Image: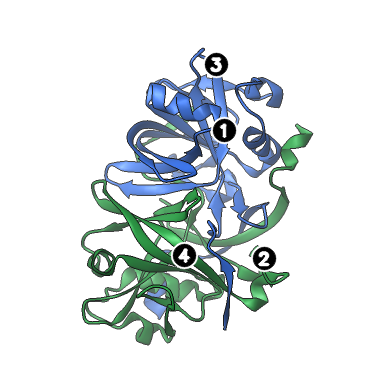
Chain colours: A blue, B green
Amino acid sequence: MKKSIGAEAVLYPAPVLVVGTYDAAGKPNVLTAAWGGICCSDPPAIAISLRKSRHSYAAVLERKVFTISIPSEQYAKQADYFGLASGREVDKFAVAGLTPVRSELVDAPYVKEFPLVLECRLIHTLELGSHTQFIGQVLDVKADEEVLIDGRVPDIYKLRPMLFSPKGHTYHGVGKYLGPAFSLGKQV
Amino acid sequence: MKKSIGAEAVLYPAPVLVVGTYDAAGKPNVLTAAWGGICCSDPPAIAISLRKSRHSYAAVLERKVFTISIPSEQYAKQADYFGLASGREVDKFAVAGLTPVRSELVDAPYVKEFPLVLECRLIHTLELGSHTQFIGQVLDVKADEEVLIDGRVPDIYKLRPMLFSPKGHTYHGVGKYLGPAFSLGKQV
């Protein structure tokens, strides 16, 4: 028998997405968002949802581009900080001791130390209530060579992305291998 | 130096979302989707993206509701099967030996054996290309009592949700605890 825990935004696991933008003054900024996910394969596209109050909100609308940097678990503190602080008040890159790199494809910065990056062009904006959903077409994905298998497939155990657990408000690493997708199910 | 791996739909980790619907004949059906995520807190809402070719696509549009059941890792085979088979041809619940339960709130079934369920009402439909994004307002979340802390917060180590790794096409469990969100970052 299942118990109601109320109408809430929960999903297990949620990702930890660090959204990179330049603000109106050209200062590189980052914001950590857990509300988002892939939304299309062709064109490849990702959705992120931000509150209007965030400094990054205006930046995405103004330049119509953003990056997503995926932090590895060794950067848990910095990733959490990027969600706590505001780029209106501080230079988050400087405080966290991390390095903004200007994307060659879009007018937005990414985090050099994070192992995987998506460069995105805004293609849809959808007002939903507390959050606005921004859908970005993925123009390119870049990764540190040392996290790639055969130079092209990210190895999740080298990438070591973080997971966010809503309601419980905790971060976790990636656990044990469970099996191959599009294959395990043939045993049913 | 980061290496380009091309413009692709990748994100680490992606969730494993089992979408429940009744088809035109009233048969309960389930489809596993990795493209999706939370997109709003108030109203609470979740986005999932489906291909038009899927049997569940018409079902979502027709009844304008769906459920999301989150499989625990012990059901990895069944969850993968739900993405491989088509509800046009088989009764996936029967083949997998799992139990459809009619939601009391929406005209859609969920998977009894999976520990957490979202009951959703379709509020937006967005054509993106290969996929259509469906946004569902979460009307309620229900969980097995044994996965809840204090009867209200899901314990991710009891829930044991699966993760999907795009491109590598593998499933993984939840790993080690990294720390508290909205708190770790204060140490930066």
Label 4 packing within 10 angstroms: few (<14), some (14-19), many (20+):
some
Where residue B74 sits, quadrant-wise, is bottom right
Q: How far apart are marks 3 and 1 (CA)?
A: 13 Å
Reply above or below: B73 against A50: below
Label 2 packing within 10 angstroms: few (<14), some (14-19), many (20+):
some
Q: Please report the residue visible at 42 percent of the width from the left and 87 percent of the height from the top.
A: B97
Q: Are marks 3 and 4 on the same chain?
A: no
According to the picture, the residue beneath numbered tag 1 turns out to be A31
Label 3 packing within 10 angstroms: few (<14), some (14-19), many (20+):
some
Q: How far apart are marks 2 and 3 (CA)?
A: 39 Å
User: Which chain does tag 4 point to?
Assistant: B
Tag of residue B139: 4
Quarter of the figure that contains the C terminus of chain B? top right
User: Which chain does tag 2 point to?
Assistant: B
Percent position (x, y) of residue B152?
Answer: 66, 68
Q: Are marks 2 and 3 in contact (CB under 8 Å)?
A: no
Tag of residue B155: 2
Q: Distance between the residues labelled 4 and 1?
A: 28 Å
